[in-house]
């Protein structure tokens, strides 16, 4: 299985990729305001690479529940200097975490080669056309509703089936736009329009998504469902995040998105080494 993003190519099976999070925002749920300054964001990103990040995910708009939307101009003001600096200082593939096709296109022109799209549930094909025209990798995330409303009583008959059906339907629409299958990664969207029970059901069923024959990305770092299970502050959720990451690796997930790169990389590599012995 191949994942292509512009000039980058990843052939699976291979060790899981660690994606480091760089939030250039004042209000993200975990680290909002810490890296709003471009220079600090770049320094943080380079530190994540030193710690083992093989992908960097750069976002300029918070997508936490009830987050206030920002304009495309403001989002670009935040992320473009970071992407431009990083494109000249690291060979690690850069992802732009955005819901806006115009922001995605400008970020790709600045050096990003992956679009991480939490709003892949949109009704129009504008983002699909950007992906097809630029040849970038595209992370298709499942979300019920929008960030402002997604946690207001989300309901599913069968959440695992609903997410699988969504991925199949998006694949058809992306293909119709000219997007190739090897450009696509799937993300089940933990915490995006899901209750605690929905999140747990999806985590327990991760292996079932491997039959779709596309790489899977899991973003569980410091998320609120961990605090619902074991009451903890956001910054104290690393153990729960690592537990989910290790289980995800055993289930066949290929990309782990995290704030805590060094710790996650160590946990993932140890898990992979143990699993390799089980197969001997």
Image: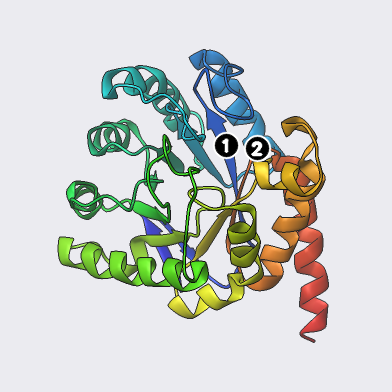
Closer to us: 88 or 185: 185
**Mark 1 surroundings within 10 Å by alpha-carbon count, few (fewer than 14), some (14 through 19), many (20 or more):** many
The quadrant of the picture occupied by the C terminus is: bottom right
Q: Is residue 118 left or right of residue 263?
A: left
Task: Residue 223: tell me if it is visible.
Answer: no
User: Which residue lies under the disc numbered 2?
Assistant: 259
User: Which residue lies under the disc numbered 1?
Assistant: 21
Task: Residue 72: tell me if it is visible.
Answer: yes
Quarter of the image holding residue 197?
bottom right
Measured along the vertical axis of the image, is residue 169 above or below residue 64? Answer: below
Q: Position of residue 192 (x, y in %)?
A: 50, 48
Q: Is residue 268 left or right of residue 14?
A: right
Is mark 2 in CB contact (under 8 Å) with mark 1?
yes
Measured along the vertical axis of the image, is residue 71 above or below residue 266? Answer: above
Residue 58 numbered mark, or none: none
**Callout 1: SS:** strand
Give the residue displayed 82% in from the left and 61% down from the top.
270
């Amino acid at each position: 299985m191949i994942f292509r993003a512009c000039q980058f190519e990843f052939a699976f099976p291979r060790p899981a990729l660690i994606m480091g999070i760089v939030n250039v925002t004042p209000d993200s749920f975990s680290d909002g305001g810490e890296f709003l300054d471009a220079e600090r964001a770049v320094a943080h990103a380079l530190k994540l690479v030193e710690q083992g990040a093989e992908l960097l995910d750069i976002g300029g708009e918070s997508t936490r529940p009830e987050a206030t939307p920002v304009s495309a101009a403001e989002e670009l003001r935040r992320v473009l200097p970071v992407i431009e600096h990083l494109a000249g200082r690291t060979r690690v593939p850069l992802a732009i975490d955005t819901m806006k096709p115009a922001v995605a296109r400008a970020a790709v022109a600045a050096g990003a080669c992956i679009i991480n799209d939490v709003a892949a549930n949109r009704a129009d094909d504008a983002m699909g056309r950007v992906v097809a025209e630029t040849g970038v990798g595209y992370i298709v995330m499942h979300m019920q509703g929008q960030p402002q409303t997604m946690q207001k009583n989300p309901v599913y008959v069968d959440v695992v089936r609903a997410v699988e059906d969504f991925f199949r339907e998006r694949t058809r629409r992306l293909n119709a736009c000219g997007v190739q299958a090897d450009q696509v990664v799937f993300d089940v969207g933990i915490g995006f329009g899901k209750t605690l029970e929905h999140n747990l059901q999806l985590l327990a069923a991760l292996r079932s998504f491997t039959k779709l024959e596309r790489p899977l990305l899991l973003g569980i770092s410091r998320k609120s469902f961990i605090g619902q299970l074991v009451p903890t502050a956001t910054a104290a959720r690393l153990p729960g995040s690592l537990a989910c990451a290790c289980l995800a690796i055993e289930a066949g997930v290929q990309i782990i998105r995290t704030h805590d790169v060094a710790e996650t990389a160590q946990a993932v590599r140890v898990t992979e080494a143990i699993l390799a012995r089980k197969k001997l």
